Image (cartoon, rainbow, N blue to C red):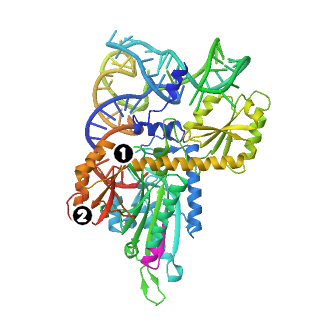
RNA sequence: CGGGAUGUAGCGCAGUUGGUAGCGCGCCUGGUUUGGGACCAGGAUGUCGCAGGUUCAAAUCCUGUCAUUCCGACCA
């Protein structure tokens, strides 16, 4: 009986069917539910709470750097979307159109924003007059719509939540510095808060954002060896400014075009958390964004003093941590499994034996190790445990990435490495020609992810054509 | 967008040659339990994804459609 029950609630083994495992976690950890429209997911309270924590953390970081939040409309008139040529070409195939208002056909159809560059540009043209108006440092939290063909929860949904920063600067240098600064914010957030190691790099020209001069990105390697673009930061130069006629009077009293950036990250990061840290027991959440950082489970709760001790513990911890006391009448074993599925970083068990001894049992989610901890000074012990979880998670993720990173000099070496060790990051040299980028993809199935900012010399010639190499590129299969 | 698979109770599934729907878990009530998904007894829950069609009769056969999922091509 017990076995049957376990089977019903169990998730697919991660290493047996990674895709199915991922989907199971999304549903069983109560992160999402499906709606009746393809690719549009319902983010449930537990999933949304993760997003809120991500938002809070990043929003504080943005504001500390002088950015202000704004809100733009969700509709873009077709003529406005069409103003920048590369931009339209990039997004037109995947926008959703509004053609009617009530029963009446609109004279001009409106697209549901797939991104808001055009709206920001239209607005910037109206508000930027003088060099004194610069820089403009805006950000917006909203949802955007892209009519994807293949959809997956968090990783690729037709509507997704994100943040898009849009800034305007006097000089190209200043805008470029902003672009890199924000890339670093994302990288720091991923590594320190999400415990996800990332590679910072520049996209190859074929992989740039539609309308950007340079696209920077951070790439993270998931447990199955596929890469996830976790955030992007774009340097626009003055291309959009020219297309939208945004000018300002400079100090020398001449009209100039400002330089622009945009940068964003999405609910996709939640998918990244799942695929980087999750295991066969379910989700594993980084303490920094976990809706519940500590769960307290009273054991033998009916025995005198147990609930009182658990409540006292809860009161002690709640000032410093997001803590939950589960005093429901489920069995302790059920609760252990439940909060493991939900990825709660630290679990505290407290029963009669512990109370007697003035201690509790502390279990860290990422390695399921149990430790006996004194109730005296428990706040600091829990803080240390949470740090231990974050560090352990990072180390584990980094170890997986190192294990799956291959330096290759030839296409054959790439195929051999992937064949032998499975998917991962391939470091290989590139001449800079798009034909060779395509050539690598055709010969090995992996694509260029980015040109890392930190370059290494893996060889002197292009892995594809053998001509002199210009960059070391990281290649991988991607989500 | 192409190829495969799947839609029956909240979840996992069964349902034979067409005859009007069942099992396990969960849920509710009562009791006993409680240190790794407890046990006993009783109870409630369904337009069989949706729309057409064939038939005296459709969960079952046919057509269409929507959604989920996997594999490719495209994209955060």
Q: Is residue A284 magenta?
A: no
Q: Residue at x 27, y 61 (%)?
A: A459
Check residue A170 for magenta coloring. Answer: yes
Instruction: Residue at 53% x, 52% y: name it.
Output: A194
Q: Nearer the viewer, residue B60 or A27?
A: A27
State the image coordinates of residue A260 (x, y, percent, origin top left).
44, 72
Q: Position of residue A62 (x, y in %)?
A: 55, 65
Same chain for the residues at labels 2 and 1, yes or no? yes
Question: Count the marks: how many?
Answer: 2
Q: Which residue is mark 2?
A: A433
In the displayed structure, A444 sits above or below A303; it is below
Q: Position of residue A55 (x, y in %)?
A: 56, 56
Who's the residue at 59% across and 48% down the image? A388
- Image-based side of B48 in relation to A349, left or right: left
Circle 1 residues within 10 Å: few <14, some 14–19, many ≥20: few
Foreground of the two, A473 or A370:
A370
In space, the residues marked 2 and 1 are separated at their CA atoms by 29 Å
Label 2: chain letter: A
Name the element at disc 1. Answer: loop
> Which quadrant is home to the N terminus of chain A?
top right
Q: Nearer the viewer, residue A296 or A428?
A: A428
Question: Any mark on residue A150, and which?
Answer: 1
Question: To which chain does the residue with label 1 belong?
Answer: A
Specify start and end residues of the magenta stretch as a single range: A165-175
Q: Residues within 10 Å of mark 2 (few under 14, many from 20)?
A: some
Relative to residue A479, is residue A211 depicted above or below? below
């Amino acid at each position: 009986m017990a076995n049957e029950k376990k089977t019903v609630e169990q998730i697919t083994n991660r290493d047996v069917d990674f895709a199915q495992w991922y989907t199971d976690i999304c549903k069983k950890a109560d992160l999402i539910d499906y709606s009746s429209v393809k690719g549009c997911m319902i983010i449930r309270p537990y999933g949304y709470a993760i997003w809120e924590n991500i938002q809070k953390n990043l929003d504080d970081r943005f504001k500390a750097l002088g950015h202000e939040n704004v809100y733009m409309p969700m509709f873009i008139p077709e003529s406005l979307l069409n103003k920048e040529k590369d931009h339209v070409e990039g997004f037109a195939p995947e926008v959703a159109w509004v053609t009617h208002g009530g029963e009446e056909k609109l004279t001009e159809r409106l697209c549901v924003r797939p991104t808001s560059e055009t709206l920001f540009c239209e607005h910037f043209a109206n508000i930027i007059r003088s060099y004194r108006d610069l820089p403009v440092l805006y950000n917006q939290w909203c949802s955007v719509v892209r009519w994807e063909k293949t959809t997956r929860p968090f990783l690729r949904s037709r509507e997704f939540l994100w943040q898009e920063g849009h800034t305007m600067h006097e000089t190209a240098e200043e805008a470029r510095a902003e672009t890199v600064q924000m890339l670093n914010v994302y990288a720091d957030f991923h590594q320190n808060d999400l415990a996800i190691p990332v590679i910072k790099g520049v996209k190859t020209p074929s992989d740039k954002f539609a309308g950007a001069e340079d696209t920077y990105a951070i790439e993270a390697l998931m447990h199955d060896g596929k890469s996830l673009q976790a955030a992007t930061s774009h340097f626009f130069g003055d291309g959009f400014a020219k297309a939208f006629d945004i000018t300002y009077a400079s100090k020398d009293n001449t009209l100039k075009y400002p330089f622009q950036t945009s940068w964003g990250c999405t609910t996709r990061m939640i998918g990244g958390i799942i695929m980087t840290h999750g295991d066969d027991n379910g989700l594993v959440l980084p303490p920094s964004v976990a809706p519940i950082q500590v769960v307290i489970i009273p054991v033998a709760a009916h025995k005198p003093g147990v609930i009182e001790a658990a409540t006292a513990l809860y009161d002690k911890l709640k000032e410093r941590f997001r803590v939950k006391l589960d005093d429901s009448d489920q069995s302790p074993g059920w609760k252990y499994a439940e909060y493991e599925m939900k990825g709660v970083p630290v679990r505290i068990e407290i029963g009669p034996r512990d109370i007697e001894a003035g201690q509790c049992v502390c279990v860290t989610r990422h390695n399921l190790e149990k430790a006996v901890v004194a109730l005296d000074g428990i706040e600091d012990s829990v803080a240390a445990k949470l740090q231990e979880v974050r560090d352990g998670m990072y180390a584990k993720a980094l170890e997986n990435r190192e294990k799956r990173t291959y330096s290759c000099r030839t296409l054959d070496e790439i195929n051999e490495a992937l064949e032998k060790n499975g998917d991962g990051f391939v470091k290989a040299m590139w001449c800079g020609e798009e034909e060779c980028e395509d050539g690598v993809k055709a010969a090995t199935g992996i694509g260029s992810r980015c040109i890392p900012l930190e370059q290494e010399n893996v060889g002197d010639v292009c892995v594809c054509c053998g001509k002199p190499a210009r960059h070391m590129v990281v290649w991988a299969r991607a989500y």
